[in-house]
Image (cartoon, rainbow, N blue to C red):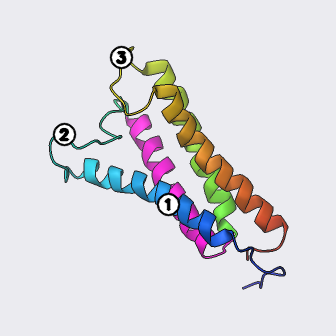
Amino acid sequence: MAQPTAPAPSHLIFVALLLLLWHGLLGADYVIERFALGEPGWPALMSALPLDALWMRVVWALGVWLGVAAALFLALKDDASVLLFFAAAAANVALAVGLILNAPPVLVLPLPLPALLGLLVVVPLMGWLYARTLNRAGVLH
C-alpha cells in the first residue's frame, strides 16, 4: 500500500463526515423504503420519486450506494473515493435526466424537483472535486 506524501488537512474528516451523513441518509431512506420498514406517512424520498422503470431503480440504487462507499473511502483517506464519487454523480445525472423526461407534472416532494435533482447531482460532484484535489496533492493513498 502506498503511503500518502502530504499530511491530511484538518477539514478532511469534517467534509468526509458531512458527505457520509448525506449519503447515509439516502442509504437509510433506500433501505427503509426497499424493505418496507417505515411507518405509513414516513417522509421518504424514494417512494416519492416516480421510479417506475427498472433502469431508474437501478440507477437510484447505484447513486445511493456508490455515494455511501465513496464517503466511507474518503473518511479512510483512500483514493478509490475519487472514482466512486464520479460514478455516483454520473448515476445521479442519469437519474435526473430520466426523472425530468418522465416525471408527472405534479410531484409531492419535500423540495421542488429541480432543486432535489440538483442536490442529488451536485453533492457527489463536489465530493469528487474535493477527493480529486486531495488525491492530486498526495493526501489520499
Q: Main secondary structure of the magenta part?
A: helix
Task: Give the magenta part as a residue range.
Answer: 54-78
Q: 111 left or right of 76?
A: left
Q: Residue furthest left?
A: 40
* Up-down relation of residue 47 to residue 19 (above or below): above
Q: Quadrant of the N terminus?
A: bottom right
Residue lying at 75% horizontally and 73% vertically, measured from the top left: 9
Residue that label 1 marks: 68
Residue that label 2 marks: 41
Q: Residues within 10 Å of mark 1 (few under 14, many from 20)?
A: many
Residue 101 drawn in magenta = no
Q: Which mark is residue 84?
A: none
Residue 68 drawn in magenta = yes
Where residue 41 appears, x then y in whole percent? 18, 39
Point out the tag, 3 or 1, that comes first from the N-terminus: 1
For badge 3, the amino acid type reads Val
Q: Residues within 10 Å of mark 3 (few under 14, many from 20)?
A: few
